[in-house]
Image (cartoon, helix red, strand yellow):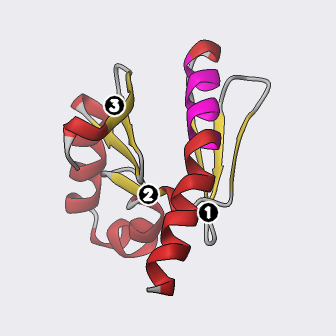
Amino acid sequence: MSETNLVLEIDHPNFIIRVTEDLLKIDVRGNVKNEIEEALENTPGLKETFGRILRVFVPLHIRLSDINSVNMEKTGEVKIALPDVDVNIPLRTEEAEKLVSKLNQLIPEAKQREINKRAH
């Protein structure tokens, strides 16, 4: 993802969220990322059982055209509905409002670009 088309960035202690015109990228960092990776490596059963679920954390790249909806819960948590799974991101209210607003602006545009690309 080119940083030149970066539309929004939210820097959180445990993760960083970057939004471009076509992509939502969530990178877990620091101790949280290390703990997840270590647990997966040290527990083969855990890797098999929870691998699909935990893939969401390390890192998560979502094409905006794949997002069904984005909403903010009363707690400030952002809920992103995807075809197969929902992703919940705990943010402060101000950050959540910015992210939801920006995604709701960009998602229809990304979906239209995808439709246009498929038509050609």
Tell me, yes or no, whether the highlighted magenta stretch contains residue 101: yes
Q: Which dot marks residue 16?
A: 3
Amino acid bearing label 2: Ile
Q: Magenta region's main secondary structure?
A: helix
Relative to 45, residue 24 above or below: above
Image x and y of residue 15, in percent:
35, 31
Q: Residue beneath label 1, please?
A: 82
- Label 2 crowd bin: few (<14), some (14–19), many (20+), radius 10 Å: some
Image x and y of residue 2, in percent:
20, 45
Q: Secondary structure at mark 1?
A: loop
Tell me, yes or no, whether the highlighted magenta stretch contains residue 86: no
Residue nearest the observer in this picture, 76 or 97: 97
Q: Is residue 66 visible?
A: no
Q: Quadrant of the C terminus?
A: bottom left
Q: Residue furthest right?
A: 74
Amino acid bearing label 3: Ile
Q: Which dot marks residue 62?
A: 2
Instruction: Name the residue: 50% across, 56% down.
Output: 64
* Image: magenta residue range: 95-104
Mark 1 touches mark 2? (CB < 8 Å): yes
| Mark whose residue sits in front, 3 or 2 | 2
Q: Is residue 72 visible?
A: yes
Give the mark, 3 or 2, whose residue is nearer the N terminus: 3
Mark 3 touches mark 2? (CB < 8 Å): no
